[in-house]
Image: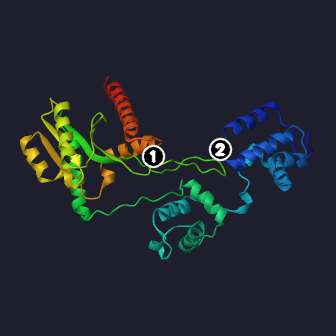
Amino acid sequence: MSSIFPKLNYFVKQRLLKLLRRCRSRIVHEHILIALNLSVGHRARQVEALLHVHNTTVYRVAKRFREHGVWSLFDGREDNGNTKLDEHFLDVLYRLVRSSPQENGWRRPTWTRELLVATMQKKLGVRIHVATMSRALALIHARRGRPRPTVGCPWSPIAKGWRLAKIRRLLDTLPRNHAAFYEDEVDIHLNPKIGLDWMLAGQQKEVVTPGKNVKRYLAGALDVRTGVLTWVEGERKASALFITLLNKLRAANPRAAVIHVILDNYRIHSSQIVKMALIGFGKRIQLHFLPPYCPNDNRIERYWQDLHANVTRNHRCETMDRLMVEVRGYLWQRNRDKCKLYYHQAA
């Protein structure tokens, strides 16, 4: 038995082992391991070498355990005063990270940890170390990511909100004999999209490109109720492709009195040939246009993102025919999964 650590009975050891299995804090995990090693007779120097900690840490954990028992392992900073990373600090940091440095009086357009430290000190008068800022960012689940370029909607917030509310009201009150779909087109390139992938140190994976690009286009409609996708393929993204999709929706939904199609403002959706086709359909197909540049409000956009992530990004298909086989296979499998889920929930 170590001379600096008290003798532990069986039940205390079992309690420490149980806490060790459930612990998610690196510091607490380290303290419990120190206590367990000391309890079986290891000396401070042995624990230092075994766990790669400083011997002063071992002595401090042992001293606090003798004075306060098991719960001393959970808080080794009582003597340092109140924690700086309190709820108010983290709340201000959360809102700060969601903004940009230029909104807070800096010329730099992107945040660094040093800049966050300086800004928080200016706002709250609390100075923390850069390493502590890393821990604070982890506590609010912040991450470094690649921003997505987007175009702002030219409509006023009131007009945009009114249009989106109208579409939501349509979907919330959709009659049983009506059908509703989110519609959009997606480009399929033989030259693969390059995306992030896991690699080993010193390795950079290569994606072979065919050089001369070939394109195919899909026009898809996502069923609001079932999540099943109806799509058509074409070599040109033109009004004819969109009209082909509308005809397929009519054939696939013969019992629907009205088919509502929610879509963006791409020019092929409002061309003269499309207007003439809608007249020929009677009032059975109604188009509902989203505000301009609002892709997040079109649910099918996430569907296309998943398609790129699972098929087209970093793909190794040598021909467009082979790539389209992969695309169709993914879409068919996803539709089967959606159908199973829908009928399981309806049962």
Q: Amino acid at mark 1?
A: Arg
Q: Which is more toward the observer, 113 or 328? A: 328
Q: Which mark is residue 247?
A: none
Q: Residue at x 55, y 74 (%)?
A: 122
Say which label, 1 or 2, has the lower sequence index: 2
Q: Which is more toward the observer, 178 or 216? A: 216
Report which residue position mark 2 lands on: 24
- Direction from residue 217 to residue 9 in the image, left or right: right
Q: Quadrant of the N terminus?
A: top right
Farthest-out residue, top? 347
Tag 1's secondary structure?
loop
Structure colour scheme = rainbow
Q: Amino acid at mark 2?
A: Arg
Tag 2's secondary structure?
loop
As displayed, is residue 129 above or below residue 302? below
Q: Which is more toward the observer, 186 or 119? A: 186
Report which residue position mark 1 lands on: 313
